[in-house]
Image (spheres, rainbow, N blue to C red):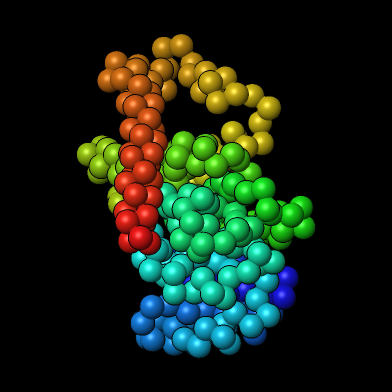
Amino acid sequence: MNKIAIIGAGSMAEAFISGILENGLMDRKNIWVTNHSNEERLSYLRGTYGVETTYDLKALFAGADLVMLAMKPKDAASAIQYIREYLTEQMLIISVLAGVSMGTIEAIAEKPLAIVRSMPNTSATVGKSATAIAANARVSQEQIEKTKRIFETVGLAKFVKEEHLDAVTGLSGSGPAYIYYLIEAMEKSAEEIGLEKQTAKELIVQTLIGAAEMVKKSTKTSTQLRKDVTSPGGTTEAGIRVLEESGVQEAFISCIKAATAQSEKMGKALCKQLEVKRS
């Protein structure tokens, strides 16, 4: 990897800058960042990570073989139009724009491009994202490998078909919020049964980490692991019974389906909006 030009300087861009540097994937002098007009944010990234920042597009794209689109999706049309003369078929375009299809990016750029589209989640900021990636037919095997290495600097990276990205959005893209919601409930219950707040938080966090590690490392299914903990007539069985009576599992399934449907709806609406702006 020679040079990456990052368009957008928000928290997701920062997560990738941090991950790339921490993993020694690229020298900081070869990471260039720009945004629409927030000079203070660029100054922060430059001071914190030692990366290059500029509003000079010629300097930004000179020698760049990777371009990351990390602006807000609503700004995608105007931003891509602004930089499209600098985009070439030889570059790998990495998109972290939620809901913006690869076809839409090409349509706005008005040229064929090698594009990978991704759906990371907010855990990228601590290097623990679960990211799904789709690539179009113009992306070479070498570029596939580059993409995988970049996304692995912020967590797990899995390639999927583009049509599955809405499902990924509903499952893992929004997934951290579901877990935070569960933690909220556990914290409230801890308070009601008299546990000290900090102690409860530490116990809850470690319980979640331990359960996740068990699922990750065990050859057993999550169903079997749950049954192993649930002794007849025991405390876990009493708790699980309440969850089943309340339809918690069904609610989670409906939650993920609803988020997936909303992702599809938002994606279609955004694509129409981008096409209108482009025309």
Instruction: Spot the residue most to the left.
Output: 192
Q: Position of residue 129 (x, y in %)?
A: 53, 52
The N terminus is located in which quarter? Answer: bottom right
Decide if residue 203 is on the left or right side of residue 209: left
Instruction: Spot the residue most to the right.
Output: 142
Vertical relation: 183 (above or below) 248: below
Vertical relation: 154 (above or below) 217: below
Which residue is more in the foreground, 89 or 17?
89
Vertical relation: 82 (above or below) 119: below
Asked which quadrant contains residue 114, the reply is bottom right
Q: Position of residue 24 (x, y in %)?
A: 70, 72
Which residue is more in the foreground, 251 or 66?
66
Decide if residue 248 is on the left or right side of residue 144: left
The C terminus is located in which quarter? Answer: bottom left
Vertical relation: 203 (above or below) 237: below
Instruction: Identify the residue shown where x is 34% and y is 49%.
Output: 272
Which residue is more in the foreground, 232 or 173?
173
The reply to whether residue 9 is visible in this rendering is no
Instruction: Identify the residue shown where x is 54% and y is 74%.
Output: 85
Q: Position of residue 236 (x, y in %)?
A: 42, 22
Instruction: Spot the residue most to the top.
Output: 232
Decide if residue 204 is on the left or right side of residue 157: left
Instruction: Identify the residue shown where x is 33% and y is 40%.
Output: 265
Q: How many marks?
A: 0
Instruction: Identify the residue shown where x is 55% and y is 42%.
Output: 162
Asked which quadrant contains residue 264, the reply is top left
Q: Position of residue 2 (x, y in %)?
A: 72, 75
The reply to whether residue 111 is visible in this rendering is yes
